[in-house]
Image (tube, rainbow, N blue to C red):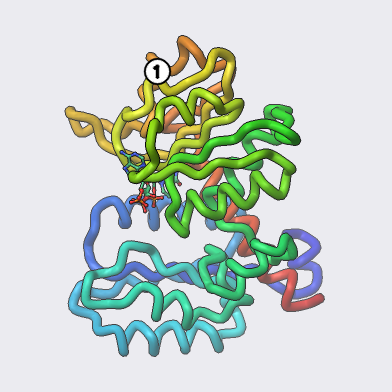
Amino acid sequence: MESLKAKGVNAGLAVVIVGDDPASRVYVNNKKKACEYCGIYSEEYALGAETTQEELLCLVDKLNKKEDIHGILVQLPLPKHINEETILNAIDPKKDVDAFHPVNVGKIMIGNFDFLPCTPAGVMELLDDAGIELEGKNCVVIGRSNIVGKPQAMLLLHKNATVTICHSKTKNLKEVCREADVLVVAVGRAKMVDESYIKEGAVVVDVGMDRDENGKLCGDVDFESACKKASWITPVPGGVGPMTIATLMKNAVTAAENTIR
Ligand code: NAP
């Protein structure tokens, strides 16, 4: 950041939110707070739920051209009348700090990327920081979304892990998971994964952000149960979530640095 500022560049991030989804509002507020903390200039565009696709495309086009904005984040999900893919594809790949644009997805596939998608990259950072070796390990990812599961599997593969991706049509899910040295759970179902899915001594990463029966934030993993088998496990809250935001900040700085390279 300081070296950027010395060159007269202040990293700038635009966060766009459409509609009034309460969870999205919390995520956007957290991202704004993180920008303030890191000294990143941020602009918020809060649009009404009735915003048309055309209007949103116009805003993305304006932000693509704005010189003081280096990163653009459109908070998902968008209202149903707006095609998410059309919007994400309209973001300049150089400003695509979420790494959802097909150009950036392709770059991740070949291992030559500018940005990594925030949540999977945050998971990799956590594993690395804990000194967990991935080469030759059996890694199982539950979930195959474009945002988490698929890129997560690719990043583990880049670390020479042997990777299995599971989804709702996977047969014998528990048995497959019990083969995992490292189990990454991104399924979107509160506390679904308990000790019966986990091999003794496995590493467990819980990506889930769900609500339990009392409306309390929880993960996809039943933490108490999983602790009986896991040698290392991430909690919810306080695990992957903050790492997602940290990676977003890193990507915003990278986007700004790339303008002066
Ligand atoms: P998603 O798009 O709904 O994908 C869920 C995946 O789980 C799908 O691939 C689905 O399979 C699979 N699945 C659903 N039920 C299953 C079952 N019973 N058995 C096996 N697989 C099943 O969700 P996502 O966007 O990837 O998010 C996953 C979780 O991570 C959510 O809790 C979300 O809130 C959380 N999340 C957290 C962060 C963070 O910063 N911590 C960021 C993003 C997401 P099919 O493909 O066959 O339908």
Give the structural element (helix, strand or loop) at label 1. Answer: helix
The residue that mark 1 highlights is: 196
Q: Which quadrant holds the N terminus?
A: bottom right
Tell me where residue 219 appears, x and y as whole percent: 37, 33
Tell me where residue 224 appears, x and y as whole percent: 39, 15
Q: Amino acid at mark 1?
A: Ser
Q: Where 216 sits versus 164, above or below?
A: above
Say left or right for 208 vs 18.
right
Say left or right for 54 vs 201.
left
- For the point 61% across and 84% down, the residue is 67
- For the point 43% across and 45% down, the residue is 143
Tell me where residue 213 appears, x and y as whole percent: 18, 29
Instruction: Give residue 195's quadrant in the image.
Output: top left
- For the point 68% across and 31% down, the residue is 137
Mark 1 burial class by Cα count in 10 Å: few <14, some 14-19, many 20+: some
Q: Where 85 sits versus 247, above or below?
A: below
Nearest to the observer: residue 209 or residue 69: 209
